[in-house]
Image: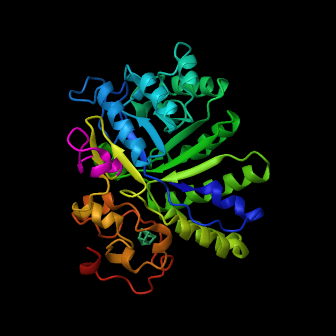
Amino acid sequence: MFRITHYLQQIDHPTPLKPARKPSGPVVIWNLIRRCNLTCKHCYSISADTHFKGELSTQEACTVMDDLKAFGVPVLILSGGEPLLRPDIFELARRAKSMGFYVGLSSNGTLIDEHNIAEIAAVGFDYVGVSLDGIGATHDKFRRKEGAFDLSLEGIRLCKAHGIKVGVRFTMTQDNASELPLLLDLVDREDIDKFYFSHLNYAGRGMKNRKDDAVFAATRDAMDLLFEHCLKNLRAGTPKDYVTGNNDADGVYLLHWLAKHYPTQQAHIAEMLQQWGGNSSGVNVANIDNLGIVHPDTMWWNYPLGSVRERPFSQIWPDVSDPLMAGLKSSPRPLKGRCAGCQHLAICGGNTRVRAWQLTGDFWAEDPACYLSDEEVGLSVPVPEEVSA
Ligand code: SF4
């Protein structure tokens, strides 16, 4: 995750670089259930409104939780499908909170209503993220459900009214790119705490809709808008948490944006960006799916590392006998093509490996969704095709 506000606040109020902190364990995004009441176009888990067999029982989930805690996992993001469809969601979330995890809920928001908001608030979720793909009919079309937008917005408002930190997650494609400004206005108007801009990833249902992906120019426009909007909020004294996901080239793009607009702050922020280091799939981000299968992150759903039913997470995660995990955990990663020669590899980390793998069958090929020019990544001579393949 790339934290825009974290960096842009340094433009007007620079602070000395703090020593890098090594997290005690990975953030675990836990898809507790695959069932969902919606069938969204870009869903990576290809969910449906039906029961999926073999999901972890309450007792099994508790055993996993104990292991995650002992392993040093600091954050659990409870996700789905739609996690609120899991009958024991509040029991599990309360348990996680009582064990000291930072607990987030990742929901489509349509099931948050007057009947359950008190219980949601009572759990003490540290954060509730609700996905919106546009305003009104645009969102409904993506979610394939009329009225979904109104329900989700009502869910967001209820969370706000009950003092829960809430955010909007927006996955951009060519079909909804034009609504980004409207989404940002909505976040301002509703005083929503966080805005998560997700680049479309080529996995799950997203893979089938690759042609719908926003073109690189639209991505750059979106990043410009996010930077400008974030800075405007900061300067107005109404800061919000703007973050992006699924494209770590965003950090490098910020560097070029700073060179153009705030060159005197560029060197300081570049140091911070290098400390961040870009992509951390398989290192600081982990995924457990509804069946208890561990993956390097949520976009690697078709790449199993092992089942928590057979081996605890604490044994699966450090195991580098798997070639993908060995590469992800090595520093630098064994990258090829333009990522190997990129002058800003220390900031980006080689971006999202699942895209390279899905396009070429090679984990370490260059990321096809890098939207920066050769000049911007410091390659003056184009990389020959046989090297970049
Ligand atoms: S070339 Fe590769 S490492 Fe460099 S910014 Fe693009 S995706 Fe990241």
Residues 378 and 103: in front is 103
Expressed as whole percent of the image width and height from the top left, the position of residue 97 reads 51, 32
Q: Is residue 265 above or below residue 328?
A: below
- Judged from this view, the residue extending furthest toward the top is 115
Q: Give the side of residue 40 with respect to residue 234, left or right.
A: left
**Residue 48 visible in image:** no
Expressed as whole percent of the image width and height from the top left, the position of residue 251 reads 54, 65
Tell which quarter ligand 1 is in. bottom left
Q: Is residue 1 above or below residue 273?
A: above
Expressed as whole percent of the image width and height from the top left, the position of residue 283 reads 39, 58
Q: Give the side of residue 134 with respect to residue 51, left or right.
A: right
Residue 265: quarter of image: bottom right
Residues 101 and 269: in front is 101
Q: Give the side of residue 174 with respect to residue 123, left or right.
A: left
Q: Which residues are magenta?
A: 297-316
- Judged from this view, the residue extending furthest toward the right is 236
> What residue lies at 48% left-to-right and 76% top-to-bottom?
377
> What residue lies at 33% left-to-right and 61% top-to-bottom?
353
Colour scheme in use:
rainbow
Residues 287 and 205: in front is 287
> What residue lies at 40% left-to-right and 68% top-to-bottom?
350
